[in-house]
Amino acid sequence: MSQKPGFKIQSVSQLYDILPENERIIVDVLRNLIANCLPEYCKEKISYNVPFFYGNKGICIIWPATIPRGGIKSGVLLGFWYGHRLLDEDNYLIHGTNKQIYYKIFQSVEEINAEAIVRLLKEAERIDTLHS
């Protein structure tokens, strides 16, 4: 299903309705991993038509290629809002041209390294608590 100009996604289920199956599965796995890892004070909302997780400040965003303006042609991007502050000991994230948001793009669910993402989420949580 293609989007109409100005189309605003209001819910995760509405997002899932427009995503191709492979992107929907990746988004679902990432959302569950993030929701199970972040503390209760952190919330999820749809922002820019994609899932956005925040606590005191932005933590991470999941951007499927199907959604315009994400800057990727295929797959699903997991971006960390303050990626430049993370201790990425696994060198898991791509630094790209953005000085702040570091990310990883997944083409399949098998590429998701849950342990590396959990370490990054715990570090992002630590940084977020410094903003409280």
Image: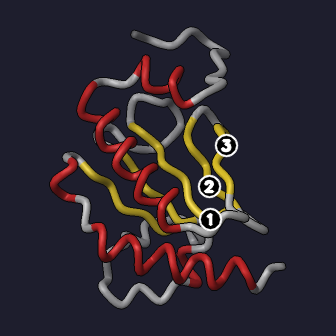
Q: Inspect the image, locate mark 2, and give the three-letter code of the amino acid beneath it.
A: Phe
**Outermost residue, left side:** 110
Identify the mark nearer the N-term, 1 or 3.
3
In the image, 60 versus 13, the foreground residue is 13
Label 2: element kind: strand
From the viewer's perspective, is 109 left or right of 130? left
CA–CA distance between discs 2 and 1?
6 Å
Please rate how many residues cluster around mark 3, counting C-alpha atoms within 10 Å: few if below 14, some from 14 to 19, many from 20. some
**Outermost residue, right side:** 132
Identify the mark nearer the N-term, 2 or 1.
2
CA–CA distance between discs 3 and 2?
7 Å
Is label 2 in contact with label 1 (beta carbons under 8 Å)? yes
The numbered mark at residue 81 is none
Q: Which residue is mark 3?
A: 45
Q: Which residue is mark 2?
A: 53
> Where in the figure is residue 24, as x and y percent of width and height?
34, 33
Label 1: element kind: strand
Identify the mark nearer the N-term, 3 or 2.
3
> Where in the figure is residue 47, as x and y percent of width and height?
67, 40
In the image, 2 versus 14, the foreground residue is 14
Q: Residue at x 43, y 51 (%)?
A: 32
> Where in the figure is residue 94, as x and y percent of width and height?
37, 70
Please rate how many residues cluster around mark 1, counting C-alpha atoms within 10 Å: few if below 14, some from 14 to 19, many from 20. many
> Where in the figure is residue 97, as x and y percent of width and height?
48, 65
Q: Which residue is mark 1?
A: 59
